[in-house]
Structure formats: structure tokens, C-alpha cells
Amino acid sequence: MLMRLAIVLAAVPVAVILHLESSSIAPLLIVTALTVLTVLMPGSAGAALLIGYAALAMAFADGHPLRLGVLIMIPALHLIHVTSALAAVVPVKTKIEPAALKAPARRFAIVQVITFVVTAFAAFVPSGAGIGLMEVLGLGALTVVIGVVALRI
């Protein structure tokens, strides 16, 4: 039950951000429906649909690509992914010891650090129509290097 509650708590900022960036109530209703689906059936495609919908909605919304809503959305969506994966394999009424969450929490933190390092690097990459191939390749190379280093930790 704890993992399913964590899914709901992680989905709250997603719903609030999408609602604030929209002029209608539709994103709030869609996120609510997908969250309910994910909580009731965590092993289903509900989490993937929720993450995909939120990512697409933020990508096509107006505003700077690295605005506060996007930066908050990144760990929230990752937390939905992690908690729904755990909820899919842990029975509902099982008591979860905090020590059992140590490894997933460590991986979550490592991925978030990598993500925000790449995001900080991307903030300095020139944008616009003149983006060169070298900038894109450099960002890709940085991602690979960080990933390799993280796997050794």
C-alpha cells in the first residue's frame, strides 16, 4: 500500500504543473485517470502512459525548455516510474522495511544527479536554428561518460 501511496504523491506535482500550464482542465483529468490506472494496476501501461503524456505535454507547451515546471517534472516522473515498478512486484499488504528501499533510492539519486548534470550542460549549449552537429555529439558523449562512471559507483 505504501508504494501505491507514493505513486499518488509523485503524481500530484505532475498534475499541478500540467494544470497550471494549461488553459483547460483536460490535463488534470487525464493525469488523474492515468494515476488511478497506475495505482490500481501498477504493472500495466498506466505509468508509461502517464509519463509519456506529461513529457509530451511539457515538450509542446509554451515557455523555455528548462523552466521550473520541467525541472520539477523530471524527478516526479522518474519517481512515478520507480514506485510503480516496485508496486508491481511487491504485494499490496506487504510491510516494506526501509533497508529494502536503500538500493532503489541510491539508483534514483544517481540517475537524478546524472540528469541534472546533463541538464546544466544543455543550458549552456547554444539554441536556435544554427545548432551544429558538434554540440549534439558533445552532449551525447557527455551522457555516455556520465553513464559509464555511474555504473562503476
Image (tube, grey):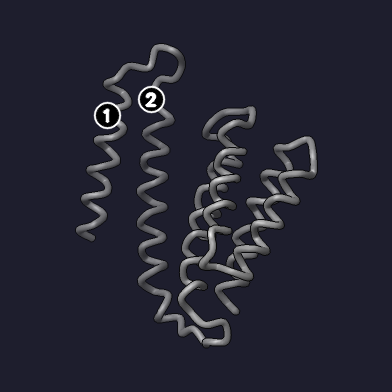
Identity of the amino acid at label 2? Val
- Per the image, the residue denoted by label 2 is 125
Residue at image point 60% right, 60% down? 10
Identity of the amino acid at label 1? Gly
Q: Position of residue 51 (x, y in %)?
A: 55, 50
Secondary structure under badge 2? loop
Who comes first in sequence, dot 1 or dot 2?
Answer: 2
Label 1 crowd bin: few (<14), some (14–19), many (20+), radius 10 Å: few
3D distance between C-alphas at marks 1 and 2:
10 Å
The relative height of residue 42 versus residue 17 in the rendered view (above or below) is below
Q: Position of residue 90 (x, y in %)?
A: 48, 79
Secondary structure under badge 1? helix
Asked whether disc 1 touches disc 2, contact meaning CB atoms under 8 Å apart, the reply is: yes
Q: Which mark is residue 138?
A: 1
Q: Residue furthest front?
A: 44
Front-most of residues 88 and 82: 88
Toward which corner of the image does residue 153 lie, by quadrant?
bottom left
Give the label, 1 or 2, closer to the camera. Answer: 1
Q: Position of residue 79 (x, y in %)?
A: 51, 60
